[in-house]
Image (cartoon, helix red, strand yellow):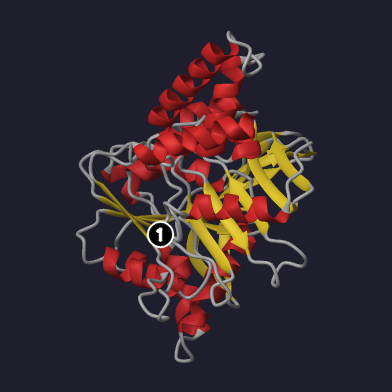
Amino acid sequence: MTSSLADEVRAHVRAQGVDPLRDTSAVRRIAEEVAAAHDQRSLTGVVAALTDPEATVGELVATISGLGPLQPYLDDPEVEEIWINDPSRVFVARAGRTELTPVILDAVEVRELVERMLATSGRRLDVSQPFVDATLPGGHRLHVVLEGIARGFVAVNIRKFVQRFRGLSDLVAAGTLTEHAADFLRASIVSGHNVVVSGGTQCGKTTLLNALATEVPGGERIISAEEVFELRFAHPDWVALQTRQAGLEGTGEIRLRTLVKEALRMRPSRLIIGEVRAEECFDLLLALNAGLPGMVTLHASSARQALVKLCTLPLLAGENISARFVVPTVASCVDHVVHLGMDAHGRRTVREIAAVNGRVEHDVIETETLFAFRDGALVRAAGTPARTERFEQAGVDIGALLRRED
């Protein structure tokens, strides 16, 4: 019965010229009208009455305008990520824990869902472009690997954008970091220090970067660059840039490195890079070395490894780039590294805040631990930050702030 009603809704959607992906409210109105007309016909005995008209309308909207069987998980605020290994194995993550759902699809349904998700993104998936990253209308991040690269079936990941935490105070309330550490990070951002946020997959790097970005003074101009739009924060003067894949002719690709270069021509007061993965790290270092404050995320297993990676990635920019230039540049540009982790229960916490003092010994950048995760809590360590003059210029007594006891 639902399939025939869905066909009827589709017919009305086409007749009224409604875009089902962008105008969900219009689709819901049409679905309600179709369901009401069906109930009227059921009074004559021609068709069976709907047992739950409201649920039927929701199912119709999910089928026409949403993602069908996946839509309830997109609507569930507790679900953080959805992925399809094969049509009969659909998983979700809640609070960092993996669950196998009862959803069973077929290969055709998966391809239709992917095409529907990509329809509004301007990105494509084919034999010449078997991978795709895209942003869904709700802000969720989509990653798809075409069959042939993924064995047997198309592999799909939907990382949901769930804005539970809008600022550092929300993260403190959630137990991600302490009030003391939050005050230090807030002072670091206000005073224009360069901050690197590191951690593993799904440990909360983008969430923390969003929270840090809310602390940027309103009079500054932020330019951000990402592979796909994931950053979401409130700021009066902010331009967000994202990469673009090549077109059918193999031209028109915009890489992250290009966006970093272009961002410097847009009069930024602050540069934010969603995630550094490759040679764009070299251009980022050049920008930071020129005195432009910035923030960035990258994958790493510790604060120390984050600095090692920052010293390695710029070497991908060309054979003429050497570690002799990169290592001291990283040491002089990066001020603080904030490392996040996730425990076995899915709890995301800041595990370390390290200060880079600018010294290099045998090609190893020296750091001082300001906050460390000990006995299940983030506590003040013995380290002290370098370049304290920026704190003084911003009117922050950093000594008193760090000596404070919670």
In depth, the one of 62 and 15 nearer the eye is: 15
Question: For mark 1, what is the residue?
Answer: 122
The residue shown at (57%, 16%) is 54
In depth, the one of 255 and 392 nearer the eye is: 255
Few, some or many residues within 10 Å of mark 1 (<14, 14–19, 20+): few
The residue shown at (42%, 76%) is 248
Instruction: Name the spot of residue 400 as percent of width and height, x first.
Output: 43, 33
Instruction: Name the spot of residue 308 as percent of width and height, x first.
Output: 60, 69
Answer above or below: position of 224 versus 327.
above
Answer above or below: position of 340 versus 256.
above
The quarter of the rendered structure image containing the N terminus is top right
The residue at the far top in this view is: 43
Total number of numbered discs in the rendering = 1
Q: Amino acid at mark 1?
A: Gly
Q: To which quarter of the image does residue 186 belong?
A: top left
Answer above or below: position of 100 versus 389.
above
The residue at the far bottom in this view is: 319
In depth, the one of 392 and 5 nearer the eye is: 5
Instruction: Name the spot of residue 28 as percent of width and height, x first.
Output: 45, 26
Secondary structure state at the residue bearing disc 1? loop
Instruction: Name the spot of residue 189 as percent of width and height, x first.
Output: 38, 44
Q: To which quarter of the image does residue 367 belong?
A: bottom right
The residue shown at (46%, 82%) is 317
Instruction: Please indicate, yes or no, whether residue 368 appears anywhere in the rendered image.
Output: no
In depth, the one of 118 and 158 nearer the eye is: 118
* Left or right of 77 on screen, residue 85: right
The quarter of the rendered structure image containing the C terminus is top right
